[in-house]
Amino acid sequence: MSMPHNILVPVVATDASLEAVTVAALIAKAKKGRVYVAHIIEVNRALPLNAELDAEARRGEQLIRRAEELALQSAGFPVTGTLLQAREAGAAIIEEAIDHDVDAIVVGAPPASVGKPGRTVDYLLKHATCAVWVVRQPMVPREPHHHE
């Protein structure tokens, strides 16, 4: 298996999503690649696609800034972030992956999604034309291993 060079990380406000940013940054740094971070605001069908969703946009921008800071802190690696509005996050992520010619989408999934990925993760696994890596945190915090 070859390690991806260009990686897209869709981010939402979960620990798993931010962990995916760290994983992607470490991989891309080792490969001298690139990481694109995208937050998708899903726009309700009752609204026009370009509706001004100020609160969501502000939250999205903060999340992207947090992901950019985290990549620098955890991997010493700069990532590029973008905010998008779309009807469906899954389709928008795949379109973004194609536009940026990425080798892999690294997506975080919360532990509750075991055996039943969320709607967006499920969509990516079925439709992405590149590799999809799912970063999932443990169900329960593990005891630290003590090495003697």
Image (tube, grey):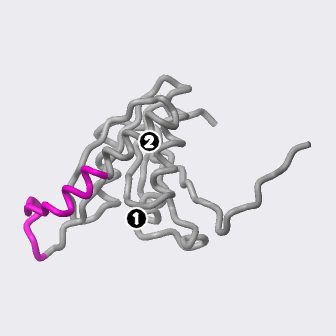
Residues drawn in magenta: 46-62
Real-space Cα distance between discs 2 and 1?
23 Å
Residue 83: give x, y in percent of width and height: 23, 49
Number of residues whose C-alpha sits closer than 10 Å to that of mark 2, classed few (under 14), some (14–19) or many (20 or more): many
Residue 142: give x, y in percent of width and height: 73, 61
Place residue 80 in its image quadrant.
top left
Place residue 30 in its image quadrant.
top right
Rendered view: 79 above or below 128 = above
* Residue 15 sits inside the magenta stretch: no
For label 1, the SS is helix
Q: Which residue is mark 2?
A: 70
Looking at the rendered structure, which numbered label has been put on residue 120?
Answer: 1
Residue 35: give x, y in percent of width and height: 40, 36
* Residue 58 sits inside the magenta stretch: yes
Viewed as shown, does residue 17 lie left or right of 80?
Answer: right
The residue type indicated by label 1 comes to: Thr
